[in-house]
């Protein structure tokens, strides 16, 4: 009899028709985003300076499920549904009784989970009359995804790419150019935020917080012609990414399997949230499902940050939100998991962690690359450095099962492939990667500059 747990792909017509919105199911109401100038709750009108109205409506919606437009479902069919794969060879390599599954989001045209929200944001912006989009990108996956979406939907895209990644990952930059995106290293000389940072530190490697500042500044100064598009953190972004978890849940149900542990890497929170949020209602009702967010030890937002109000960017132009943060002027070390180098965490993810519904762990980059190499040798896929964090955690949990004999079902989100990250793998294999644990003293110093809010 065929073992249906080896690999299962949903039929094409079973792409979810709705996104799941966790807002009504959160254990507590979320604090409202605040104006970075006044510290008071933002009005929808104030948010419209950087986001289109339809995106703002999704951001604040309390509707449990939101319809996916048919036009977007047609675009999703280019790569969705994505396969939920049994990592049987990895299990054998680890000699574990656990079953390991991964949701393979690397099969999208841009090579990661990011197009799930990129095409949605481009679609709604175009529909609402936006002339062009500005954005930031860390490792380049989000910039590639939005450039791809802009080409499909017909809307120009400008990307501010964190300088250290711009230099480390030239092929991601070229991929954006191939899709028609304009790419600038951040900090740049094109914005006040960029020029101010370069005056302070001409060799600044950049950060996601700073790149966000530059993209937001360009949108704000465009007179309404351009809007800002964000690749993670905010509610509407994770909403679009729940298509990942909804598919995963459906795939497991088709096999008659309930996962025991769900794992995802976290930088801003979109791939982790999109993967686990559809399982949260069951968790709240008492089902024993562990959900583990994995971050780099060099940017330990959840594990060492503070749950408080902070700016979403370095130049204090983005909304103030309640989240786990290392401080908005936090400048992380130049690790190769560029997509995880963000000072804050999605407010929804932060709330769930604060309430004890999810767990968090942090790893240095060398053990993560070691796990990535094991996965590549077993399953044939070279993962993105970001995804390697989830793989490391999955391997650790599987090895625990080897000790206890427990036959747990472990699933992780393979958020993207590492085909454009080979210089990072080369440095790992040459022993040139440095592990860095961010000191608590520097975090404490950065947290002294938190904003005051009036809510």
Image (cartoon, rainbow, N blue to C red):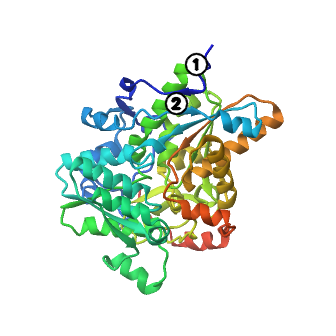
Tell me the distance, in whole angstroms, between the alpha carbons under discs 1 and 2: 19 Å
> Viewer-nearest of labels 1 and 2?
1
**Is residue 339 visible to the viewer in this orientation of the structure?**
yes
Q: Is residue 336 visible?
A: no
Say which of 314 and 415 sits in front.
Answer: 415
Residue indicated by mark 1: 256
Q: Residues within 10 Å of mark 2 (few under 14, many from 20)?
A: few
Residue 282 position, x and y percent, is 55, 28
Image x and y of residue 6, in percent:
60, 27
Tag 1 near tag 2, CB within 8 Å: no
Question: Which residue sits at x=44%, y=38%?
Answer: 242
Question: Residue at horizontal 56%, vertical 72%?
Answer: 446
Position of the N terminus by quadrant? top right
> Which residue position is annotated with label 2?
281
Q: Position of residue 354 (x, y in %)?
A: 59, 48
Q: Is residue 220 left or right of residue 400?
A: left
User: Where, by quadrant of the figure, is residue 243 drawn?
Assistant: top left
Instruction: Determine whether, in the image, residue 30 is placed left or right of residue 218.
Output: right
Whether residue 92 sits left or right of residue 201 in the image: it is right
The quarter in which the C terminus is drawn is: bottom left
Q: Residue furthest right?
A: 403
């Amino acid at each position: 009899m065929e073992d249906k747990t080896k690999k299962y792909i949903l039929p094409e017509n079973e792409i979810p028709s709705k996104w799941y919105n966790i807002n009504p199911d959160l254990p507590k109401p979320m604090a409202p985003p605040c104006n970075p100038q006044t510290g008071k709750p933002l009005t929808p009108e104030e948010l419209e300076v950087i986001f289109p109205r339809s995106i703002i409506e999704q951001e604040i919606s309390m509707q449990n499920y939101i319809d996916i437009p048919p036009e977007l479902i047609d675009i999703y069919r280019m790569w969705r549904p994505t396969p939920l794969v049994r990592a049987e060879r990895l299990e054998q390599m680890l000699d574990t009784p656990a079953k390991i599954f991964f949701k393979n989001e690397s099969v999208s045209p841009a090579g990661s989970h990011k197009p799930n929200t990129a095409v949605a944001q481009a679609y709604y912006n175009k529909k609402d009359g936006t002339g062009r989009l500005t954005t930031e990108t860390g490792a380049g996956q989000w910039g590639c995804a939005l450039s791809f979406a802009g080409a499909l939907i017909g809307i120009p895209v400008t990307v501010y790419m964190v300088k250290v990644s711009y230099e480390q990952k030239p092929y991601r930059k070229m991929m954006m150019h191939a899709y028609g995106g304009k790419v600038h290293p951040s900090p740049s000389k094109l914005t006040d935020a960029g020029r101010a940072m370069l005056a302070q530190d001409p060799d600044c490697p950049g950060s996601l917080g700073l790149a966000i500042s530059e993209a937001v500044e360009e949108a704000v100064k465009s007179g309404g012609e351009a809007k800002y598009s964000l690749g993670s953190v905010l509610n509407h972004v994770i909403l679009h990414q729940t298509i990942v978890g909804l598919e995963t849940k459906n795939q497991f149900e088709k096999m008659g399997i309930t996962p025991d542990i769900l794992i995802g890497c976290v930088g801003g929170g979109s791939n982790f949230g999109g993967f686990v949020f559809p399982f949260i209602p069951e968790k709240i009702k008492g089902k024993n499902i562990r959900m583990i967010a994995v971050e780099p030890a060099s940017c330990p937002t959840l594990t060492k940050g503070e749950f408080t109000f902070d700016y979403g960017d370095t130049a204090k132009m983005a909304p103030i939100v309640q989240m786990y943060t290392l401080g908005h002027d936090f400048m992380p070390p130049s690790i190769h998991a560029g997509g995880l180098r963000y000072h804050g965490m999605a407010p929804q993810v932060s709330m769930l962690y604060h309430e004890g519904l999810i767990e968090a762990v942090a790893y240095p980059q060398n053990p993560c690359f070691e796990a990535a190499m094991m996965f590549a040798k077993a399953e044939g896929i070279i993962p993105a450095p970001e995804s390697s964090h989830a793989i490391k955690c999955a391997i650790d949990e599987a090895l625990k099962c080897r000790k206890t004999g427990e036959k747990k079902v472990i699933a992780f989100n393979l958020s993207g492939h590492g085909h454009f990250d080979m210089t990072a793998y080369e440095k790992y294999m040459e022993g040139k990667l440095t592990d860095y644990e961010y000191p608590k003293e520097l975090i404490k110093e950065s947290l002294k500059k938190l904003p005051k809010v009036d809510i």
